[in-house]
């Protein structure tokens, strides 16, 4: 269904209109307020919400629904970015159940596009997850540091706080990154790269702000409640590409 | 407008329906046959085709149209992947002309999604251009080789043959890559990586085929006339991710 209200492909609406069953999952990302009501009105029926459990632990059972009936699953973003949805297709393939994917706008391409940076200068994408008692990953810090060394920008997605049903805050992200940086000695805070913060990407209230990593947490209040996508800028070629224009915008 | 017929966002159709002027560019990629006729019928007017010249050399003049009127520009793929469209926004910003971007499905996310590989294991994207008498770039071979060394997959887009109005053929791509490989001594053909070929991505006749680089050119006849997106697979983690399943499909 894409990023903001109305991003859904026209042919996806048509398929949902004529399907026997329409499901929707809302846990892999956040939908804009009022989006589902808008979809319901467009397709003339109320989609049935499926949980993470339905799509992960009970994936076989969910796929099985599509053996006799035409089932449409609506998802935020582009449907094949999340691993969960790929597994559904793998199961359907194995079971001989026919599937069809309708693509949608993804933060993956939209975030790079909105930065106006060159697509060819991005290294591997990074995800910053919450640290838990027995799960304290640090690989993302190494990937960002390696990208910087290679003159590549890093597109960074932030985790979802599932208990509180909200996106990760910029202060939390900086804190986790700081701990990973200290553990791995990646020197990220010492290098203090520019960070382009994209808030509510693809929505009408989208905002872009350029800051330094060391100053990013100060924007916490300003960014409260917003869904954030970050781009850590390699210093190479940034001026030339005009991204620094974002810096002078009135955002503080 | 995305990849295949009907990929266009519902809100893009609405904007076009109410715009004073609707433009369309068809040179940055290929539109599915019959797509424009379908769009025309949906929005109730015939978009005016703009050339590469209108959007590049005469970009200021084209942007100027939007000073007094509401102008919608329809583009293939996601509008901000091509540099041309970003420049239009830069000009509009400078001129104080308000713009709004509606995102769309892009080969950038759809190609990775359809491969069912992890998004986190892709290095920088690569574009393979035609060699010309005084322009024989080789950097793409180095990027693919570096990605392989780092255990990263490479998403590869192919050039458009503008004289003949057709996409680059797989034989041409292998030939150019071979020459760049020989010049740069990247050893790509010696390593002979798996290549996932995605033909007509996002369309109803989309096909995926896994082959080895050394054998790819043999698929020329089978792939004739199709738009190709390639993924050069790092050997790391390929079995685990189930991509080799594509290999057993009936495609030869």
Image (spheres, coloured by chain):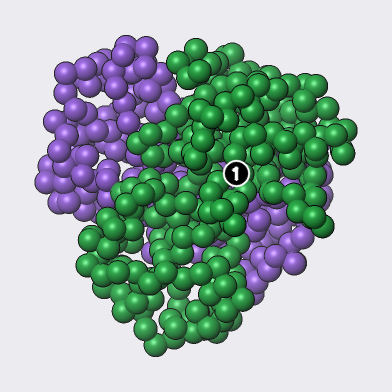
Chain colours: A purple, B green
Q: Position of residue A50 (x, y in %)?
A: 26, 29
Q: In the current view of this chain or complex, which residue is farthest to the bottom?
A: B68
Answer whether residue B7 is visible to the viewer in this image. Answer: no
Left or right: where B212 falls relative to A108: right
Q: Which residue is mark 1?
A: B168
Q: Nearer the viewer, residue A172 or A236?
A: A236
The residue drawn where x is 32% and y is 52% is B34
Q: Position of residue B68 (x, y in %)?
A: 39, 88
* Corner quadrant of residue B57: bottom right
Question: Is the residue A141 above or below the residue B62 in the image?
Answer: above
Q: Quadrant of the N terminus of chain B?
A: bottom left
Q: Nearer the viewer, residue B195 or A206?
A: B195
Q: Specify the subunit that label 1 lies on.
A: B
Q: Secondary structure at mark 1?
A: loop
Left or right: where B54 falls relative to A10: right
Q: Position of residue A109 (x, y in %)?
A: 52, 49
The residue drawn where x is 77% and y is 21% is B191
Question: Is the residue B101 above or below the residue A69 in the image?
Answer: below
The residue drawn where x is 38% and y is 76% is B71
Q: Nearer the viewer, residue A185 or A230?
A: A230
Left or right: where B214 falls relative to A156: right
Answer whether residue B189 is visible to the viewer in this image. Answer: yes
The residue drawn where x is 75% and y is 67% is A239
Left or right: where A234 falls relative to B112: right
Question: Is the residue B37 above or below the residue B239 in the image?
Answer: below
Q: Nearer the viewer, residue B222 or A159?
A: B222
């Amino acid at each position: 269904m894409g990023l903001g209200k109305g991003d859904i492909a026209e042919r996806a609406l048509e398929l949902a209109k004529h399907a026997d069953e329409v499901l929707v999952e809302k846990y892999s990302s956040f939908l804009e307020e009022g989006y589902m009501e808008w979809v319901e009105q467009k397709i003339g029926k109320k989609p049935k919400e499926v949980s993470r459990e339905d799509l992960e632990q009970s994936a076989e059972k969910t796929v099985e629904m599509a053996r006799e009936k035409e089932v449409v699953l609506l998802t935020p973003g582009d449907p094949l970015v999340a691993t969960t949805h790929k597994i559904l297709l793998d199961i359907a393939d194995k079971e001989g159940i026919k599937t069809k994917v309708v693509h949608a706008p993804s933060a993956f391409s939209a975030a790079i596009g909105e930065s106006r940076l060159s697509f060819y200068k991005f290294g591997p994408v990074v995800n910053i997850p919450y640290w838990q008692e027995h799960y304290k990953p640090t690989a993302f810090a190494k990937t960002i540091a390696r990208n910087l060394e290679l003159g590549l920008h890093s597109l960074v997605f932030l985790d979802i706080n599932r208990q509180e049903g909200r996106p990760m805050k910029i202060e939390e992200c900086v804190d986790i990154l700081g701990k990973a940086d200290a553990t791995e000695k990646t020197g990220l805070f010492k290098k203090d790269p520019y960070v382009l913060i994209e808030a509510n990407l693809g929505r009408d209230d989208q905002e872009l702000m350029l800051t330094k990593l060391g100053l990013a947490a100060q924007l916490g209040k300003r960014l409260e409640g917003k869904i954030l996508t970050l781009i850590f800028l390699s210093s190479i070629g940034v001026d030339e590409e005009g991204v620094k224009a974002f810096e002078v915008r009135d955002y503080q």
